[in-house]
């Protein structure tokens, strides 16, 4: 990993979600946990804030993740966790504030990200930012669908 200039340093900080991705212990899970904490401590089902954060993180993630692969010297390097962070937030979008829903969203997202059901596994094979961000966006959408269905079936508030 090179750290030659300011641009590369910014890419490292952003793509690793302020160095969470540099954790030697389950970096993607740690970034997902950070997103869970952002959801329960900051967003609290404020749809406008949540949508704004997801929009910004998605835009920034697509902007930096392909370049981060080059900086880290590896396709979808383990240090790049902005996709995991964003995926959890996508999974919790348009849901009411509930610790139960947020915990389930975290767990379901990690399962979706790990199992990679169709077409998630195909998305991660794409080049650059599309491969890094795409699979976790789809995992987040799947998580959201599961949570919305559970909410409707179990009449959660």
Image (cartoon, rainbow, N blue to C red):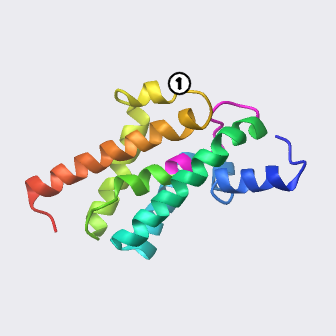
Residue sitting at x 64%, y 50%: 21
Q: How far from the left and from the top, in percent, is residue 25?
A: 61, 48
Q: Is residue 74 magenta?
A: yes
In the image, residue 122 sits, relative to residue 29, either above or below, namely above
Residue extending furthest toward the right: 4
Q: How far from the left and from the top, in percent, is residue 5?
A: 88, 51
Left/right placement of residue 142 relative to residue 19 reads left
State whether residue 37 appears in this view. Answer: no
- Segment tinted magenta in the rendering: 73-84
By secondary structure, the bulk of the magenta-drawn segment is best described as loop
Residue sitting at x 31%, y 47%: 143
Q: How far from the left and from the top, in percent, is residue 124?
A: 51, 30
Left/right placement of residue 123 relative to residue 119 reads right
Residue 46 appears in which quarter of the rendering?
bottom left
Q: What element carries label 1?
A: loop
The quadrant the C terminus occupies is bottom left
Foreground residue among 146 and 108: 146
Residue sitting at x 27%, y 61%: 101
Q: How far from the left and from the top, in percent, is residue 130?
A: 54, 35
Foreground residue among 112 and 65: 65
Q: Does the magenta stretch include residue 41?
A: no
Residue sitting at x 52%, y 52%: 58
Badge 1: residue crowd in 10 Å (few <14, some 14–19, many ≥20): some
Q: List the residue tagged with mark 1.
A: 125
Foreground residue among 38 and 65: 65
């Amino acid at each position: 990993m090179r750290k030659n200039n300011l641009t590369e340093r910014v890419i490292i900080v952003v793509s690793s979600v302020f160095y969470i991705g540099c954790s030697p212990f389950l970096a993607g899970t740690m970034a997902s946990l950070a997103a869970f904490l952002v959801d329960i401590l900051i967003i609290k089902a404020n749809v406008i804030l949540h949508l704004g954060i997801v929009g910004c993180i998605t835009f920034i993630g697509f902007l930096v993740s392909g370049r981060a692969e080059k900086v880290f010297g590896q396709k979808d390097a383990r240090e790049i966790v902005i996709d995991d962070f964003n995926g959890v937030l996508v999974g919790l979008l348009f849901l009411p504030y509930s610790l139960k829903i947020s915990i389930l969203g975290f767990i379901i997202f990690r399962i979706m990200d790990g199992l990679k059901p169709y077409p998630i596994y195909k998305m991660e094979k794409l080049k650059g930012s599309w491969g890094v961000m795409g699979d976790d966006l789809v995992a987040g959408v799947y998580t959201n669908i599961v949570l919305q269905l559970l909410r409707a079936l179990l009449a959660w508030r």
